């Protein structure tokens, strides 16, 4: 079995990288970027080979998801997440964010609008403004070392009315992998108040404790009508986010048609590269993925230990994602800005409608995580 070297430093500067070629970085200043969620690791060999094959063929016309891709996806849902699905439930689209926007456009009314938990991945709350629909939010609580929903607040918001609930599992930021009790509660509440569940499961394969199951919420409707929409992609777990491809699983034909109507004319077709890349991830990616998760788990432990020993900082262990959510004491002032000035770019909690927190991307080399910790330590020394 090949052993991948995640310590390898790959220079991403000058590659039009959203992360590394950030135009806001001061000219001449060495910045360590840990904002947007992509990884600094080279992808699995088989995926590179699949992409090379397409490139060598040399013709890049319009492409459609083929039967092999659809069957591979169906098998994955069954094998990895224990969900039996039909092939016709699949709707292939180039990205989850445009899919969420299309779903909200299709199903959120101007009266009841969109519900989500906060802090949350920013498009979940921004979509309300993009579509001019009301946004309703409820908070998350830290219970026994993990973030979970404030279910009472969730029910209050649902009582006030919401057409769609945007669910993120594993949760970004904070990394909660929702358990069966939580999923049952969410489904029961949404059913009670007639609210559709739109579920983003892009981080499903990024579980830092892989023995914990990923539970698909769309597989939890029992015999009652299943009008959920669940999005999946391998783009985060296999570091291929720039080659957009994702799938919506929509069991109900009417919901599927309504969703599709809101994609026509807005979303481009898939690229051949994306299709072949996705097939290679599904067929061959597991060795790379498990080694990558072990590596990121070590980065995560380093940060966790540093935070636990640092006055004024706090984080819960990530169950999933590589996106740490570090809370800081308000006495530290504008911690994000201080880190930026010291050469570390992390995202501000407010971007996710959180407070006194920053989000750090740990999918990078160990040496970068060590550097980030050193910068945080220096800023704390200067501030405390
Ligand atoms: C929860 C979540 N959903 C979706 C995305 C982006 O998905 P896509 O690139 O398919 O639009 C991200 C990227 O970080 C994410 O964290």
Image (spheres, rainbow, N blue to C red):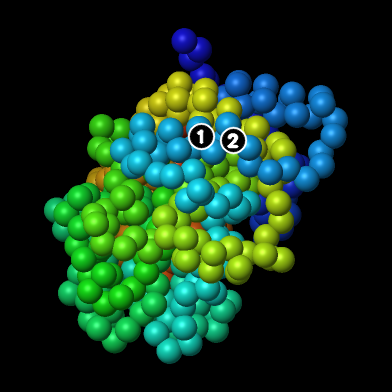
Res 124 visible: yes
- Is 47 in front, or is 326? 47
Furthest toward the left, the residue is: 144
- Is 383 in front, or is 88? 88
For label 2, the SS is helix
- The structure residue drawn at horizontal position 65% and vertical position 32%, both measured from the top left corner, is 276
Query: Which residue is identified by label 2?
Result: 67
Could you tell me residue 291's position as x and y percent? Answer: 43, 24
Residue neighbourhood size for the residue with mark 1, other residues' Cα within 10 Å, grouped as few (<14), some (14–19), many (≥20):
some
Furthest toward the right, the residue is: 58
**Horizontal arrangement in the rendering, residue 279 relative to residue 22 (left or right):** left
Q: State the mark number for residue 314.
A: none
**Horizontal arrangement in the rendering, residue 341 relative to residue 142 (left or right):** right
- The structure residue drawn at horizontal position 61% and vertical position 68%, both measured from the top left corner, is 261
For label 1, the SS is helix
The CA distance from mark 2 to mark 1 is: 6 Å
Could you tell me residue 133's position as x and y percent? Answer: 49, 83
Could you tell me residue 367's position as x and y percent? Answer: 49, 32
- The structure residue drawn at horizontal position 70% and vertical position 29%, both measured from the top left corner, is 51
- The structure residue drawn at horizontal position 37% and vertical position 28%, both measured from the top left corner, is 294
Furthest toward the bottom, the residue is: 111
- Is 111 in front, or is 151? 111
Residue neighbourhood size for the residue with mark 2, other residues' Cα within 10 Å, grouped as few (<14), some (14–19), many (≥20):
few
Query: Which residue is identified by label 1?
Result: 71
The quarter of the image holding the C terminus is bottom left
Badge 2 vs badge 1, beta-carbon distance below 8 Å:
yes
All told, the count of numbered labels is 2
Could you tell me residue 288's position as x and y percent? Answer: 48, 24
Q: Is mark 1 within 8 Å of ligand 1?
A: no
């Amino acid at each position: 079995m090949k052993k991948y070297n995640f310590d390898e430093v790959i220079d991403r500067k000058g590659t039009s990288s959203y992360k590394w070629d950030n135009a806001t970085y001061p000219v001449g200043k060495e910045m360590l970027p840990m904002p947007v969620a992509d990884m600094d690791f080279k992808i699995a060999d088989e995926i590179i080979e699949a992409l090379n094959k397409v490139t060598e063929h040399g013709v890049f016309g319009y492409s459609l998801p083929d039967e092999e891709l659809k069957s591979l996806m169906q098998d994955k849902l069954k094998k990895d997440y224990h969900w039996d699905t039909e092939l016709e439930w699949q709707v292939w689209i180039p990205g989850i964010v445009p899919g969420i926007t299309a779903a909200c456009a299709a199903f959120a009314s101007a009266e009841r609008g969109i519900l989500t938990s906060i802090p949350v991945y920013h498009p979940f709350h921004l979509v309300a403004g993009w579509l001019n629909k009301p946004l309703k939010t409820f908070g998350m609580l830290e219970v026994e070392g993990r973030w979970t929903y404030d279910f009472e607040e969730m029910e209050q918001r649902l009582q006030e009315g919401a057409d769609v609930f945007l669910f993120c599992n594993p949760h970004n930021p904070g990394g909660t992998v929702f358990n069966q009790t939580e999923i049952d509660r969410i489904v029961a509440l949404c059913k009670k108040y007639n609210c559709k569940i739109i579920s983003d499961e892009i981080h499903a394969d990024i579980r830092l404790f892989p023995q914990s199951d990923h539970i698909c919420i769309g597989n939890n409707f029992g015999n009652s009508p299943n009008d959920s929409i669940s999005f999946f992609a391998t783009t985060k777990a296999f570091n291929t986010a720039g080659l957009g491809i994702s799938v919506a699983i929509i069991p109900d034909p009417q919901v599927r048609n309504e969703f599709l109507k809101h994609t026509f004319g807005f979303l481009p077709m898939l690229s051949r590269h994306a299709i072949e890349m996705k097939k290679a991830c599904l067929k061959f990616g597991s060795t790379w993925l498990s080694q990558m998760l072990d590596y990121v788990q070590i980065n995560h432990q380093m940060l966790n230990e540093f935070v636990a020993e640092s006055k004024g900082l706090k984080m819960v262990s990530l169950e999933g994602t590589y996106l740490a959510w570090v809370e800081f004491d308000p006495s530290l002032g504008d911690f994000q800005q201080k880190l930026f000035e010291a050469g570390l770019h992390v995202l501000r909690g407010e971007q996710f409608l959180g407070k006194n927190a920053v989000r750090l991307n740990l999918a990078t080399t160990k040496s970068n995580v060590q550097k980030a910790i050193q910068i945080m330590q220096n800023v704390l020394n200067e501030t405390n």
